[in-house]
Image: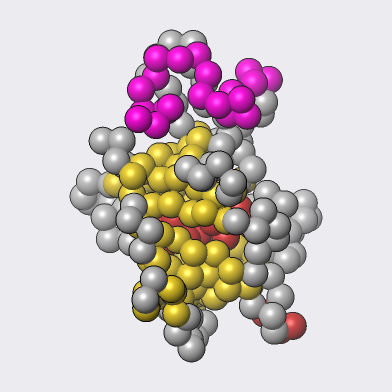
Amino acid sequence: MFPFSKHRSRSVHGDDVLSSTQPIVAVTSIVETGGACTTLTVWRKSLLVSCEGFTVIDSNGDLIYRVDNYARTRPEELILMDKDGNSVLLMHRTKKITLAGSWGIYEAKDTNGEAKVPKSPIWYMRKNLKMNILSTNSNILAYVYSAPFDKKNSYVIKGSYRCKSCKIMHVPSNRTVVEIKRKEARTKGVRFGSDVFDLVVSPDFDTGLAMALVLLLDQMFSK
């Protein structure tokens, strides 16, 4: 049982207790959809003691995704796995100077227990390198394009990842498809820290891709 699936304790983990003085940046928009959204609980902690990573569960408390980073350093590659440890998506840091601050997202293919990287990514995510208080795009964290940089199928990520308050918007329709927000405890007196948060995904958006974007936001804005 995961520590946040039953709210019986006044704390989750040593680093997960939210101080009452910690500021929260609110995002007023919500996921806009005609169907039922999927809400996943994301825990910024690997299930393996020797690793850093993420654990993702659904509303029933079942494990959905996991990330285990053995390096404990600034990785050049990230692997999103399902509950059985099979690779779902791979993310590689782009080394081209013209794509500074970018990552490629690849569809993973397991071969003999090892993930093979296809030649071409299916998505790119690029950090907004022009963020400043004077810019009109100061609240844009990153841009997401389907390969090869198709602006007709593109997204922007707005808000504050550090405060776990941001949204992913489809650019052509200006529609919110994913929201990252603080997790609210059901038990009075229980508060979660920023390492435990909700990922709300529209039914027409892939939950694996949504989680991959979370991993890249963490690389871009938590270091």
> Does 7 lie within the magenta span?
yes
Residue at 44% of width from left, 79% of height from top? 116
- The reply, left or right, for residue 51 in relation to residue 58 is right
Q: Is residue 159 visible?
A: no
Image quadrant in which you'd find residue 173: bottom left
Q: Main secondary structure of the magenta part?
A: loop
Q: In this view, does 42 lie above or below 91?
A: above
| x 45%, y 84%: residue | 118
Give the image location of residue 30, x and y in percent. Answer: 40, 44
Q: Which residue lies furthest to the top in this view?
A: 188
Q: Residue at x 64, y 69 (%)?
A: 76
Q: Position of residue 65 (x, y in %)?
A: 38, 52
Please state which of residues 180 and 218 is positioned toward the viewer in this rendering: 218
Along the viewing direction, whichever of 121 and 74 lies nearer the viewer: 74
Identify the colour scheme used.
Answer: secondary structure
User: Residue 94: where, in percent of width, then height?
Assistant: 64, 77
Number of marks drawn: 0
Across and down, in percent, residue 195 comes to 56, 37
Residue 14 visible in the picture: yes
Q: In which quarter of the image is the N terminus?
A: top left
For the magenta stretch, what is the residue range? 1-21
Residue 143 on the magenta segment: no
Q: Which residue lies furthest to the left in this view?
A: 35
Question: Residue lying farthest front?
Answer: 112
Would residue 122 be found to the left or right of residue 204 on screen? right
